[in-house]
C-alpha cells in the first residue's frame, strides 16, 4: 500500500515540501515517482533529521578539514540568486545539499558554478541565472566608426587575450597609437608599446600609460604572445571612446553584470548632452561631474562639443576605467597634466567618498542592480534615505547622492530605467525628487541597451524652491511637448509622458464619484511557473493532461485555441498558485505582457502559465463581466498605459483603475453587450466601439476628452 506526499507529511509531522526533498534525496525507503507523483510505502519509517541530529563520519572529516559548510544564504550570494529561487532549486532537485539536508560543501558549489558557466548543467541550462553568465560581447552601438567596430570583432575572434594583464597590454598599445595619431606623430609599426616604454623621457602620457599597466612587465614573451592583436590598428576619432569600446567588449560580461554596469550607447550620450544644451545655453561655463564615469564617454562627448576639459570631473570604482578615462581626455587636451587628470578623474566608491566641491551639473548613467556586500549594504542603510526595502537599488542611491553633490539650482541629468517613475519599490526616491526638485526635461528612450529588455529615460531635474513640473520638456519618441499646467502626484507615480490635455483626462477618470477599486477587493494569482516548459508542456493531447493557456492565447473577450497541454502536478512546478485559483467557478485571465490591457472571462477552470495571470474580483454588487468590460475598455487602456507606461501589466496597475459603481440595470445592459461580443461572429470592432462609448459615458467624459483618449491610443491594437 502506498500513501501520498500529503499523507506522508501528516504521518511524519513535517511539511509537504520536506517530504518531496526527502524523496528526491532517496531518504524515504521505497518511495517512487509515478507519472510525476511521489508514492510512498505506507509502512516507510520517518528518516532521521540530518539537519540537526545526524552527521556521519565522512561529514565530520569534511568539517575537520575545511571548518566551513555553505548555507543557503552563502550560495545565494555566490550564485547571485534570491533565497526563494535557491529553495525552489532545492525543491526541484536542481541543486542538492551534500552535507545533511541544508548545507553544501564548497567543492560542490564550485563544481556547480563551473557547470553553470560552461553550459554543462542541463538542469538549469534553459533558465540559467543571468548574473552567472560569462563571455565577451561586441557592444557595437557604443561607437560609430566602422573600422573600430571591425577591430574589436577581430580581437574577439582571435581569442589571444586571456587575462587582465593581456588586456591591459593591448589597451596600452592602442592608447599609444591614438596618442601618436592625435599628435600627428608618424609610426610604421602598429606594435608601438614596447618601444614607447623604452624611451627615457617620462612625460605626462608616459605616466598615464604606466598607471594603466601598473607593475606588469611588458617583455618579449607577452609581446610575442599578443603579436596578432598588437599589430592591429585603432583609429583616433575625436569624441569617440574607442579605448572604452575595446575594454568593455573584451571584459568578461559576468564582471559587468555583478557591478550593475550598463554601457551607454553613443546615441544616448549625445541625446543627453543635447538635452543639457537646450536647458542651459551657457553650459561651457559650468563645472560638470560624472560620478560613475566609466572610461569617460560622457566627458569625451562634452569635450568634443567644445566644453573646457578643465571643467570636467569624473569618478568610478573601477581603476582600469579611470585610467582609460584619463588617457582619453589627455589625448584631446595636451594642456592637462597627469597631476591635473589624477585630481579630476578619481578612483573611488561614490556612495561613500567623493569630491568635496559641489558641481553645476551631474550627469551620466549610474549602475543598475549592483550587488552590495553585507557591510556596504549596512553602511548604505545608515547614509541614504533611499536604501530601504528588502533590496537596495543602486540607481536610487545614485540619484540621492548626485543631488547632494549639486550646487543649488544645478542640474542632474541621468540615464535611468523607466521603472523609477512608477514602480512601488522606487517610491522613496520619487518622493525625494518631488519634495526637493523641479523637473526640467525627460526623454523616453524605450529599450536602447542591446540585449536588455528595460525601457529607459533621460531625466533632468534641479534642486530648487519651485518644486514643479511646469516647463518640463518631454520627448516620447512620437511626440514632443512642454508641460504648462501644475500637476499633483498624490500616489507618487510620475506620469510625465502625458500632455496637459491627456493629464486632464487622467484627472477626470481618477475623479469620478462612487468609484471602487480592486485593491483589497480581489484575489490575484500568477500563472504556473513550471521551471522547465520543455519538460512539462506537450503539444499533444492525452488522457492524463489538459489545456494550458499562454498570454498569447488571451484575446479581449475570448481565447485562441491553445495547442499546449500539461499534466497538473503542482508539487513538481517551480511556482504555483493555490489550485482553487485555477479551478475557480469564474475568473478573469489577462496577458502579463501587452501594450494595452487584454482580459477575458473563464468559467471552465482552465490552467494558465505565468504569461497569463488571474484576477477574481470580489466587489459587492458588481458582476464579474461588468468589471471585465471596464478593464477591456479604451478608458482603462488609456489610464494604465499613460499612468504606468509599461508593457508589463502589474497587479498594482490593475488595482489603481477606478471602477464606476452603477445599478444592476446598467450592469445588465453592459453585460448583454459583453456576451454578444463573446459569442458573436459579427464585426467585433463595431460591437466593441459601441460598448466602449457606453463605458466612456460611465466616466462622464466629454466629447473632447473621448477624442483625446482615442487619439492617444491610435496605432494600438484594441481588438485583440
Image (cartoon, rainbow, N blue to C red):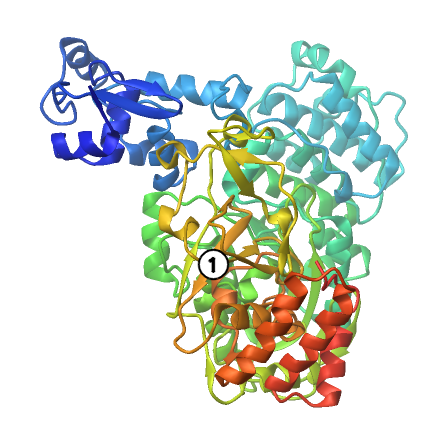
Question: In the image, is 525 to the left or to the right of 677?
Answer: left
What residue lies at 66% left-to-right and 29% top-to-bottom? 250
Any part of residue 460 in sight:
no
Q: Is residue 345 above or below residue 483?
A: above
Q: Is residue 59 above or below residue 463?
A: above
**Hey, which residue is sitting farthest left in the picture?**
53
Picture quadrant of residue 95: top left
Number of marks:
1
Which quadrant holds the C terminus?
bottom right
Any part of residue 677 in sight:
yes
- Which residue position is annotated with label 1? 587
Question: In the image, is 469 to the left or to the right of 368?
Answer: right
Looking at this view, is 506 or 186 the one in front? 506
Q: Secondary structure at mark 1?
A: strand
The spot of residue 392 in percent (x, y) is 41, 54
The spot of residue 263 in percent (x, y) is 65, 45
The spot of residue 580 in percent (x, y) is 36, 50
Which quadrant holds the N terminus?
top left
Picture quadrant of residue 458: bottom right
Looking at this view, is 389 or 700 the one in front? 700
What residue lies at 26% left-to-right and 16% top-to-bottom? 26
Q: Is residue 191 above or below residue 346?
A: above
The spot of residue 251 in percent (x, y) is 62, 31
Question: In the image, is 659 to the left or to the right of 323?
Answer: left
Badge 1 crowding class, 10 Å Cα cut-off, few under 14, some 14 to 19, many 20 or more, is: many
Looking at this view, is 81 or 337 the one in front? 81
Amino acid at each position: 500500500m502506498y500513501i501520498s506526499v500529503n499523507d506522508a507529511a501528516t504521518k511524519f509531522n513535517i511539511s509537504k515540501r520536506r517530504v518531496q526533498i526527502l524523496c528526491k534525496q532517496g531518504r524515504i525507503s521505497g518511495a517512487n515517482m509515478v507519472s510525476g507523483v511521489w508514492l510512498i510505502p505506507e509502512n516507510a519509517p520517518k528518516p532521521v533529521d540530518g539537519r540537526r541530529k545526524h552527521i556521519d563520519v565522512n561529514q565530520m572529516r569534511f568539517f575537520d578539514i575545511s571548518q566551513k559548510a555553505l548555507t543557503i544564504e552563502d550560495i545565494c550570494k555566490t550564485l547571485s540568486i534570491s533565497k526563494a529561487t535557491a529553495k525552489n532549486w532545492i525543491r526541484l532537485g536542481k541543486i542538492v545539499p551534500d552535507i545533511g539536508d541544508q548545507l553544501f560543501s564548497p567543492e560542490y558549489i564550485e563544481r556547480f558554478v563551473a557547470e553553470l558557466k560552461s553550459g554543462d548543467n542541463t538542469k538549469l541550462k534553459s533558465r540559467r541565472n543571468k548574473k552567472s553568465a560569462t563571455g565577451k560581447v561586441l557592444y557595437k552601438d557604443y561607437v560609430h566608426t566602422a573600422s573600430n567596430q571591425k577591430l574589436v570583432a577581430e580581437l574577439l575572434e582571435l581569442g589571444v587575450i586571456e587575462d587582465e594583464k593581456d588586456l591591459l597590454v593591448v589597451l596600452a598599445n592602442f592608447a599609444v597609437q591614438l596618442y601618436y595619431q592625435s599628435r600627428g606623430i608618424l609610426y610604421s609599426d602598429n606594435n608601438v608599446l614596447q618601444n614607447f616604454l623604452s624611451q627615457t623621457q617620462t612625460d605626462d602620457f608616459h605616466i598615464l600609460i604606466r598607471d594603466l599597466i601598473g607593475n606588469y612587465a611588458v617583455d618579449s614573451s607577452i609581446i610575442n604572445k599578443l603579436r596578432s592583436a598588437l599589430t592591429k590598428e585603432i583609429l583616433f576619432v575625436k569624441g569617440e571612446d574607442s579605448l572604452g569600446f575595446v575594454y568593455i567588449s573584451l571584459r568578461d560580461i559576468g564582471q559587468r553584470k555583478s557591478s550593475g554596469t550598463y554601457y551607454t550607447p553613443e546615441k544616448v550620450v549625445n541625446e543627453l548632452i543635447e538635452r543639457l544644451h537646450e536647458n542651459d545655453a551657457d553650459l561651457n561655463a559650468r563645472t560638470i561631474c560624472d560620478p560613475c564615469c566609466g572610461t569617460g564617454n560622457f566627458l569625451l562627448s562634452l569635450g568634443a562639443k567644445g566644453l573646457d576639459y578643465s571643467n570636467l570631473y569624473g569618478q568610478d570604482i573601477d581603476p582600469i576605467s579611470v585610467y582609460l578615462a584619463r588617457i582619453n581626455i589627455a589625448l584631446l587636451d595636451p594642456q592637462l597634466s597627469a597631476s591635473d587628470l589624477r585630481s579630476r578623474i578619481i578612483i573611488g566608491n561614490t556612495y561613500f567618498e567623493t569630491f568635496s566641491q559641489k558641481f553645476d551639473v551631474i550627469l551620466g548613467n549610474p549602475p543598475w542592480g549592483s550587488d552590495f556586500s553585507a557591510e556596504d549594504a549596512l553602511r548604505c542603510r545608515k547614509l541614504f534615505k533611499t536604501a530601504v526595502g528588502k533590496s537596495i537599488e543602486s540607481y536610487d542611491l545614485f540619484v540621492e547622492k548626485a543631488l547632494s553633490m549639486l550646487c543649488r539650482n544645478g542640474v542632474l541629468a541621468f540615464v535611468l530605467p523607466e521603472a523609477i517613475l512608477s514602480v512601488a519599490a522606487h517610491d522613496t526616491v520619487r518622493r525625494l525628487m518631488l519634495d526637493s526638485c523641479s523637473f526640467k526635461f525627460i526623454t523616453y528612450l524605450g529599450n536602447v541597451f542591446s540585449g536588455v529588455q528595460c525601457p529607459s529615460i533621460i531625466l533632468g531635474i534641479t534642486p530648487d524652491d519651485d518644486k514643479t513640473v511646469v516647463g518640463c520638456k518631454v520627448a516620447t519618441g512620437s511626440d514632443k511637448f512642454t508641460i504648462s499646467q501644475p500637476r499633483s502626484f498624490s500616489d507618487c507615480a510620475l506620469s510625465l509622458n502625458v500632455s496637459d490635455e491627456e493629464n486632464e483626462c487622467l484627472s477626470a477618470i481618477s475623479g469620478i464619484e462612487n468609484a471602487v477599486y480592486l485593491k483589497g477587493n480581489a484575489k490575484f494569482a500568477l500563472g504556473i511557473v513550471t521551471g522547465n516548459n520543455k519538460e512539462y508542456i506537450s503539444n499533444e493531447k492525452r488522457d492524463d493532461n489538459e489545456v494550458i493557456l499562454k498570454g498569447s492565447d488571451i484575446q479581449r473577450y475570448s481565447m485562441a485555441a491553445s495547442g499546449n497541454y500539461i499534466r497538473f502536478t503542482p508539487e513538481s512546478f517551480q511556482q504555483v498558485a493555490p489550485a482553487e485559483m485555477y479551478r475557480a467557478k469564474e475568473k478573469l485571465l489577462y496577458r502579463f505582457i501587452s501594450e494595452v490591457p487584454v482580459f477575458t472571462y473563464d468559467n471552465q477552470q482552465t490552467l494558465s502559465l505565468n504569461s497569463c495571470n488571474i484576477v477574481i474580483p470580489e466587489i459587492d454588487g458588481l458582476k464579474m463581466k461588468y468589471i471585465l468590460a471596464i478593464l477591456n475598455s479604451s478608458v482603462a487602456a488609456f489610464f494604465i498605459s499613460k499612468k504606468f507606461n509599461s508593457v508589463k501589466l502589474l497587479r498594482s496597475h490593475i488595482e489603481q483603475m477606478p471602477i464606476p459603481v452603477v445599478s444592476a440595470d446598467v450592469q445588465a445592459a453592459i453585460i448583454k453587450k459583453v456576451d454578444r461580443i463573446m459569442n458573436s461572429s459579427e464585426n467585433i470592432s463595431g460591437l466593441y466601439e459601441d460598448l466602449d462609448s457606453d463605458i466612456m459615458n460611465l466616466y462622464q467624459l466629454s466629447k473632447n476628452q473621448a477624442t483625446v483618449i482615442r487619439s492617444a491610443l491610435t496605432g494600438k491594437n484594441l481588438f485583440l
